[in-house]
Amino acid sequence: MPGDKSISHRAMIFGLLSVGETRVTGLLEGEDVLRSADAARALGARVERLGEGHWRIQGVGVGSLMQPKETLDFGNAGTGSRLMMGVIAGHAITARIDGDASLRKRPMQRILDPLKLIGMQVVDEAEGGRCPITIKGAETALPIHYETPVASAQVKSAVLLGALNAAGKTTVIEPEATRDHTEKLLAYFGAEILVEPYGLNGTGRKITLTGQPELKPKPIFVPADPSSAAFPLVAALIVPGSDILLKGVMMNPLRIGVITTLLEMGASISIVSSSVEGGEDVADLRVRASHLRGVDVPAHRAPSMIDEYPILAVAAAYASGTTRMNGLHELRVKECDRLAAVAAGLHANHVRHEIMGDDLLVYGGCGTVEGGGLVETHMDHRIAMSFLIMGLSSQKQVCVDDTSFIATSFPGFMENMSRLGADFNAIETDQTA
């Protein structure tokens, strides 16, 4: 399995912000992460690939970033671009941030607003706070108290990274706990950070960071990405007779909402062995073909599985009964409007479904999906992979219009799936090969 993308981005950032040499093993070498590596170089780090998944980063430390000479091009990487905005916000440098056509459509205002409170200025931006954006970091970064309007690890992380160069304590409150890799790495690299439950039911988090630490380099082990693992996992569940082992999958409780949901649906997923690597729970998972049933997925689970709803919709299509996924408003602002894209893909393959507000209802076919559709991916890697997985057990083949973006998060996806028995072929259509 490829390394976790969220941790891989952060490995580059923390390598940049620490003084000395950071060694990384298991790094995801997808296009998104390589753009973060380029940005770290542009801001002063020496970044070197030593071998497959093995990297060395010689950092410059908090407060010592270089002025980038050229535009920081993040391609399709929403996480990399947003987190690096936070890094730049706390430093007195100016940077232009841009990306591909998909990234240019994604909203950045939710990131820019809190960073302005730290002291960052927006020099120039496209309409609606979108890329390309030129930002000028704070001359003197200010500690702030900020409550995130939505449950977003990217917003939270950008604020914490921006506040690293601010004297004093910064507090970030999030209404629902989101992936906590930034907080864990801050503590691991030597920052003073306190994380406390927040809210009436304790599902939120209050994070307090003391600024201007001297981050000390540490080795980083990147476990397998649970978001990537979801694709062969669901494939094994829906293809009769399947029995596979997924090795070294990260089991952070804030990242495994899709596994929790699939278990509720009756999936045969068992932990073969478990360990702790680099502060993260890791496990080998045995997955066998299963008869799935529809369930009601609560909205509060969304932060722990926000990237996995497209592949969950595929599992739901093969289940018996109705699966209702509640509170999917955040899917509308991903690489594309993922909620609309998933619905269109289901429609193209004759899967009964319904969108009610921000909820998606999928009426399962009791193990049968007709297929036969051509799915428009909208330059979204997870849409492409999800509907390729659908085609592995459908009555008619499922086609997607583009697979080039899969490499942003899962290089080798088609080769790995083919070794498990998948049959992928490039097919000429009247649209795109």
Image: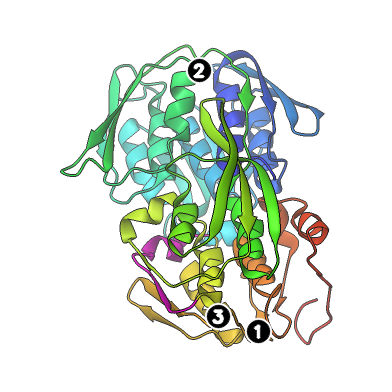
**Relative to the observer, which residue lies in front, 215 or 100?**
215
- Taking the spot 73% from the left edge, 65% from the top edge, the residue there is 403
Residue linked to disc 3? 346
Quarter of the image for residue 68 reads top right
**In the image: residue 171, left or right of residue 77:** left
Residue linked to disc 2? 189
Q: Is residue 31 above or below residue 389?
A: above
Residue linked to disc 1? 371
Q: Position of residue 188 (x, y in %)?
A: 49, 19
Q: Position of residue 281 (x, y in %)?
A: 52, 33
Q: Residues within 10 Å of mark 1 (few under 14, many from 20)?
A: many
Q: Which residues are magenta?
A: 320-334
**In the image: residue 322, left or right of residue 20:** left
Magenta residue check for 41 = no
Mark 3 secondary-structure assignment: helix
Which amino acid, mark 2? Phe
- Taking the spot 60% from the left edge, 85% from the top edge, the residue there is 348
- Taking the spot 51% from the left edge, 65% from the top edge, the residue there is 312
Q: Is residue 188 above or below residue 264?
A: above
Q: Nearer the viewer, mark 1 or mark 3?
A: 1
Residue 251, visible in the rendered structure: yes
**Relative to the observer, which residue lies in front, 324 or 77?**
324
Alpha carbon distance from label 1 to label 3: 9 Å
Work out whether mark 3 precedes mark 2 in sequence or the reverse, and give the earlier one: 2
Which amino acid, mark 3? Leu
Q: Is residue 181 above or below residue 352?
A: above
